[in-house]
Amino acid sequence: MELKILDHPLVDHKLAHLRAKDTTSPTFRALADELVTLLAYEATRHVRVCPIQVETPITTMTGVELANPKPLVVPILRAGLGMLGGMTRLMPTAEVGFVGMVRDEETLQPMTYAERLPHDLSRRQCFVLDPMLATGGSLGGCVEFLARRGADDVTCLCILAAPEGVENFRKLVSELEINTTLVVAAIDECLNEHGYIVPGLGDAGDRLYGAVD
């Protein structure tokens, strides 16, 4: 697994305001959207392209476009939806699939409750969106799910990660033997006894969309 941590003052600026507890949901959504576009820029550095001929007002030249099959963007429901706009803004021709996963708060293990993905992901580059990499179970479970469908190149985008989550995720994907990249805005200090990232930013899904009883 390749780990990429963004190092940019704009990322740090937006992340600081994202963490603030008094940031409202509309502002939180806007900041997350902007931050994901910065993450996506780095995450798509090696997206597959093919040459095309382009007629400019002056002459003909060789350019590139996204190769087929098109990349697949996969937000993990529900918090991953808050990252979708920022990703597809940068790569609008990509296709979108969905995986619904929830963490059991007692065992901290992921459970899949929904999915909408192509049955065959062979030769597809996949980009998984999940704001928080805490224990690593949900993200690792999603990558495993994609690998069973034939994916062999998966890039995961997370806003925050805990060191424990990164290491657990590394172990999980090492067993899959597929090309995996993890792109994060920051790695925080640790997980607390409840499995939340410290200092973190709280529950990303609740801050994006409101609390769910």
Image (cartoon, helix red, strand yellow):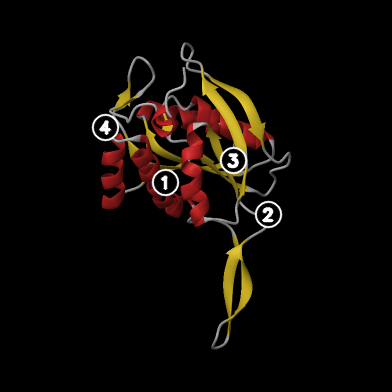
- Label 1: element kind: helix
Residue 133, image x and y in percent? 43, 31
Tell me the distance, in whole angstroms, between the alpha carbons under discs 4 and 3: 41 Å
Among numbered discs 2 and 1, the one appearing first in the sequence: 1
Q: Residue at x 70, y 45 (%)?
A: 122
**Is the C-beta separation of discs 4 and 3 under 8 Å?**
no
Pointer 4: what residue?
22
Among numbered discs 4 and 3, the one appearing first in the sequence: 4
Q: Is residue 19 visible?
A: yes
Pointer 2: what residue?
69
Give the residue at the far top of this rendering. 106
Pointer 1: what residue?
33
Which residue is at the front of the view, 168 or 137? 137
Amino acid type at image mark 2: Pro
Disc 2: CA contacts within 10 A as few (<14), some (14-19) or many (>=20) = some
**Is the C-beta separation of discs 1 and 4 under 8 Å?**
no
**Is the C-beta separation of discs 2 and 1 under 8 Å?**
no
Residue 166, image x and y in percent? 42, 32
Vertical side of 162 occupied by 6: above or below: below
Give the foreground label among 1 and 3: 1
- Label 3: element kind: loop
Tell me the distance, in whole angstroms, between the alpha carbons under discs 3 and 2: 18 Å
Vertical side of 92 occupied by 141: above or below: above
Tell me the distance, in whole angstroms, between the alpha carbons under discs 1 and 3: 28 Å
Among numbered discs 3 and 2, the one appearing first in the sequence: 2
Vertical side of 122 occupied by 22: above or below: above
Tell me the distance, in whole angstroms, between the alpha carbons under discs 1 and 4: 18 Å
Left or right side of 161 for 67: right
